[in-house]
Structures are given as C-alpha cells and as structure tokens.
Image (cartoon, helix red, strand yellow):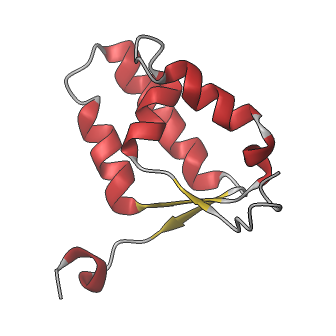
Amino acid sequence: MAEERGMTALFADNFYWIALIDLSDSAHRRALELTTSSLAEVPIITTDEVLAEYLTFFATAHEQMRRKALANAQRILKSPGVRVVPQSRDSFLPV
C-alpha cells in the first residue's frame, strides 16, 4: 500500500513518538495502527531535535514514564528501520 502511494519514507515528529508510548494519549491507538499497518514497512525518518523534544516532554513525568521514554529513544537510535538525522548548525539555525 505504501509503495502504491509512492512513499519512500515517513517523517516522525515528537507527536508520533509520544502517542506511541503514552497509553493515555488520545492518539495512542492511531499511532499503534500506523506502526502495525502496511506503512510499518516504510522507513521512518526523524531528527535529533525531535528526540530532544520527545525526551523534554517526559522530563517532568513520573520516573517510570521517564525511563520508558529514555529506553524508547535508545531503541529508536538503534533501529534499522529509523533514520535519525543528526543535528547540525545548518539544521538548527534558520537560513
């Protein structure tokens, strides 16, 4: 299905990553559906900046959720299906 749509990759922002692990998030079910659908075969692209926002979101959460978010960020960084674009001066500063 993703190939039929001509998709070569999907961009995942912190909204997706947060919804994926936060069971109380209103978008949690949809994030899971995307993860297990035919789109799951499409590579995901995200950025260091997105992961920093993701971890910041959970910085004030209870310890168990902070640990879960950190473990998930580590899995994202190691995942062969996810390309994490490193932060650079060019990506950080507006042109």
Residue 95, picture quadrant = bottom left
Q: Is residue 62 above or below residue 77?
A: above
Q: Position of residue 6 (x, y in %)?
A: 74, 68
Of residue 14 and residue 85, the one placed in the foreground of this image is 14
Residue at 27% over, 85% down: 90
Of residue 31 and residue 66, the one placed in the foreground of this image is 31
Q: Is residue 17 above or below residue 80?
A: above
Q: Position of residue 25 (x, y in %)?
A: 40, 18
Residue at 19% over, 23% down: 60
How many numbered circles are shown?
Answer: 0
Outermost residue toward the front?
Answer: 5
Q: Position of residue 8 (x, y in %)?
A: 71, 68
Residue at 68% over, 36% down: 35
Residue 44, picture quadrant = bottom right
Q: Position of residue 72 (x, y in %)?
A: 53, 36
Residue at 16% over, 81% down: 94
Residue 33, picture quadrant = top right
Of residue 47 and residue 36, the one placed in the foreground of this image is 36
Q: Is residue 24 above or below residue 56?
A: above
Lateral position of residue 83 relative to residue 57, left or right: right
